[in-house]
Amino acid sequence: MNVLRFADRVASRWKNGGGITWEYAVHPPGAGLDDFFWRISRARVVGHGAFSVFPGIDRSLTVVDGDAIDLLMTDRRVRLDRTTPPYRFPADQPIECRVPTGPIEDLNVMTRRGHWTHRVARHAVTGTTRIDLDGDVGLVVALARLRIETETGEAGDLEPGDAALFETATTVALSPRQGTGEAIGIRLDHVAHPWA
């Protein structure tokens, strides 16, 4: 279990310069915004504007702080908030965003189409909650103060915004350190090609 403290993340500008992002993990390590195979990050959206375009990338966005964000695409408008499921869309299409009631923060999972794929889910944490991270790579992002324990007995405390990264399939047990909590579970899978 590799614990990634949010306090240790370094803020950087969006690809198009329109906002701030904090990277949790990227593959291959050290890859930039144009050559990654997968990337997990958190972003702050403070005003209306355009999303960065990522050719060949599939993206999932989950609101983790603030009220709501509207995604304006060529054929539809989608509103996301703290209650909606993660929303998946092609990152190579132009998208405008609106934040009607003020800044939000979102969790972004991006994978290069044809090479990696991903699944993202919200999890309410009441009592002991088990999350199956049965992909090639798994990540849990805490949205509250949580205790995490692995199948092998590793355990630790996560503050809001902290993440735990796993490079083998596993199941983790989460429990709130006070009241109830919430976490985001992410599964990343390498796409196997028949000629490989």
Image (spheres, rainbow, N blue to C red):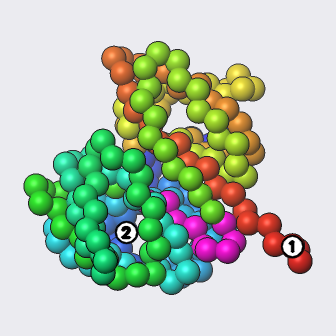
Instruction: Return the disc, 1 or 2, that comes first in the chain's sequence.
Output: 2
In this view, 118 is above or below 134: below
Q: In the image shown, does 119 or 14 lie closer to the viewer? A: 119
Quarter of the image with the C terminus is bottom right
Residue 64 in view: no
In this view, the residue farthest toward the front is: 75
Quarter of the image with the N terminus is top right
| Residue matched to label 2 | 12
Q: In the image shown, does 117 or 109 lie closer to the viewer? A: 117
Residue 161 in view: yes
| Residue matched to label 1 | 194
* Mark 2: secondary structure: strand
Q: Can you tell which mark lies on residue 134?
A: none
Please provide the residue range marked out in magenta: 107-116
In this view, 96 is above or below 181: below
Residue at the spot x=18%, y=57% of the render?
103
Left or right of 62: which side holds 166?
right
